[in-house]
Amino acid sequence: MKIAILPGDGIGPEIMNEAVKVLEALGEPFEMETAQVGGAGYAAHGHPLPDSTLKLANEADAVLFGAVGDYQYDRLERALRPEQAILGLRRELGLFANLRPAILYPELAGASTLKPEVVSGLDILIIRELTGDIYFGKPRGVRECPDGPFKGQREGFDTMRYAEGEIRRIAHVAFQAARKRDRRVTSVDKANVLETFQFWRDIVSDVHKEYADVELEHMYVDNAAMQLVRAPKKFDVLVTGNMFGDILSDAAAMLTGSIGMLPSASLDANNKGLYEPSHGSAPDIAGKGVANPLATILSAAMMLRFTFGRSEQADRIEAAVKRVLAQGLRTPDIYEAGTSKVGTREMGDAVVAALQ
Ligand code: NAD
């Protein structure tokens, strides 16, 4: 069980320390090796994804990633900016499935912008296809408009496309994930307007024939956006393409009102994965010891479940997080009157103590 530990920039090293502490406390024979990535990679090796870091990520069974990005690197040419590291890792490791649970612990129901009764106890999983769709389709660019009322003017254009195999593999991920949950999948598309997504719908339905024990529902993306805000608890697993997933997963993340709580996983075809919190490097609070480490700790739990098949250890970590919240411990981002404010390290220590 070799894990590449990539802390990154900003609060990355602080939150990663706590996740590593929790992993160490489990008493499993993990082999953990740390490397620099993002701005830290650029500062040390002149590239946000140094060769040595990529080599480690390739060799490891899983990557635990903190966050990258810092304002001081914003003026670098795009290819050298810290954020390129995450795109490079997705591409190099073939991470095509992004899993983002949106969970709202009842103790934190007050943190959401939605009414507590709408979101309290929310537990949904958004699965976003990560390497295809209009984000990667070619041709793309700016050209002279060939037809229509704007013929001859400049126009921007992209290409939306999905190959059958791409849809099949993400559909399998969704149905298999649903089997570990409430056995319901909602496939989100725009089949009424887009050929690509009529094809998506047909292929998902075909894959579903192998999963008679899982319920499948199809939903248009505009309706899904509405339902996510109106009655999010009705979903179990939601699977969709890259662009729709990008938008819906951010909306779902914010239902919980606490970006410091949300883990994520990006998986390849063999369940090798990159696990990271859904938030960024939070340069505004870096170095202050106040960042919430729970999203990173919960990402480590996802790693145990999806890559290492250690569901019982993942359950242990998640139960410890619930216990700590029930004890009233809160980092400043989730603090409410009547609870106890703690820093990054105290929160990590409390999770370790709650594991025992
Ligand atoms: P951000 O997620 O870093 O921060 C948004 C807000 O949330 C900030 O106020 C921050 O203090 C707060 N926040 C985030 N994580 C927190 C935590 N664990 N505990 C407490 N508060 C937390 O997003 P941003 O400010 O838009 O971006 C900052 C940098 O992060 C940028 O350079 C951006 O490119 C990068 N970024 C990286 C990733 C990634 O590494 N995967 C993702 C998003 C943004």
Image (cartoon, rainbow, N blue to C red):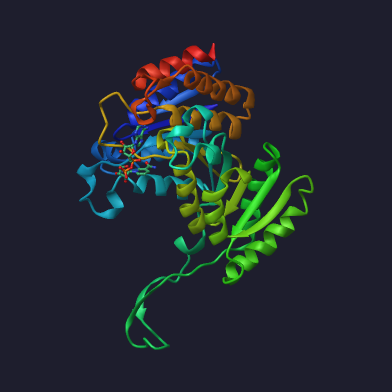
- Looking at the picture, how far across and down is residue 208, in whole percent? 73, 53
Q: Is residue 271 left or right of residue 140?
A: right
Image vertical order of residue 168 relative to residue 256, above or below: below
- Seen at 74% across and 46% down, the residue is 214
- Seen at 52% across and 18% down, the residue is 323
Q: Is residue 207 left or right of residue 258?
A: right
Residue in front for this viewpoint, 219 or 275: 219
Give the quadrant of the N terminus. top right
The quadrant where ligand 1 appears is top left
Q: How many marks?
A: 0
Q: Is residue 136 visible?
A: no
Q: Is residue 316 visible?
A: yes
Image vertical order of residue 165 relative to residue 289, above or below: below
- Looking at the picture, how far across and down is residue 39, in whole percent? 27, 40
- Seen at 54% across and 11% down, the residue is 356
- Looking at the picture, how far across and down is residue 290, in whole percent? 31, 25
- Looking at the picture, how far across and down is residue 80, in whole percent? 28, 49
